[in-house]
Amino acid sequence: MSDRLPHEKGFHVSWDQLHRDARALAWRLQGHGPEGGWRAVVAITRGGMAPAMIVSRELDIRTVDTISVKSYNHQTQAEPVIIKHPDADVVGDGTGVLIVDDLVDTGRTLEVVRAAMPKAHVATVYAKPKGRPMVDTFITEVSQDTWIFFPWDMALQYVKPYHGTDD
């Protein structure tokens, strides 16, 4: 057992870093879409919305929709449930559709999403080892026990030094 607190094995992502990484994801996806390009981007809400916006802009994909999957209660993972589906007339079985999320953790959320759009291409900015098999394209891998702190979850505040004092 570790004496480390959850936030001590954290990976802090700033807005600037997220933007750079989402652009890198778009560049990696360039040329890997179907002939004629991607038909649509589907963001997995809520975390996938910012990267999906950046990817859709970089790849000039004008049709953007969302799929809402609830799989966390604060920092505790629960059984994933789709609470909002994308437009079925647009996404169909997922052919030519790019699904974007911020992170794949265990892959349980993506199992539900892939079942809804089995032929879609799934891309995440960050990936953990357990979830990697569920993703077609990603940018950065972090260890399974790392907690990623995204910019929309953070506020600037004083933090006491780990050792000693700051006087």
Image: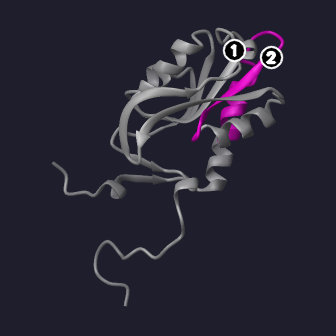
- Label 2: state its secondary structure: loop
Q: Which residues are magenta?
A: 22-47
Where residue 124 sits, quadrant-wise, is top right
Mark 1: which amino acid?
Ala
Residue that appears at 73% across and 40% down = 54
Label 2 sits on what residue type? Gly
Look at the image and say whether residue 44 sits in the magenta stretch.
Answer: yes
Mark 1: give few (<14), some (14-19) or many (20+) Cα within 10 Å: few
- Residue 48, horizontal then vertical, whole percent: 61, 37
Q: Nearer the viewer, residue 66 or 4?
A: 66
Q: CA distance from mark 1 to mark 2?
A: 19 Å
At x 69%, y 35%, the residue is 52
Q: Relative to 61, is 67 on the left or the right?
A: left
Q: 114 left or right of 143?
A: right
Residue in the image at 76% along x and 33% along y: 56
Percent position of residue 75, x then y: 38, 47
Q: Please, which residue is most extreme toward the left here?
A: 1
Labelled disc at residue 88: 1
Pointer 2 residue: 37
Q: Nearer the viewer, residue 158 or 66?
A: 66
- Relative to 110, say whether 25 is above or below: below
Callout 1 secondary element = helix
Between circles 1 and 2, the one closer to the viewer is: 1
Residue 72 drawn in magenta: no
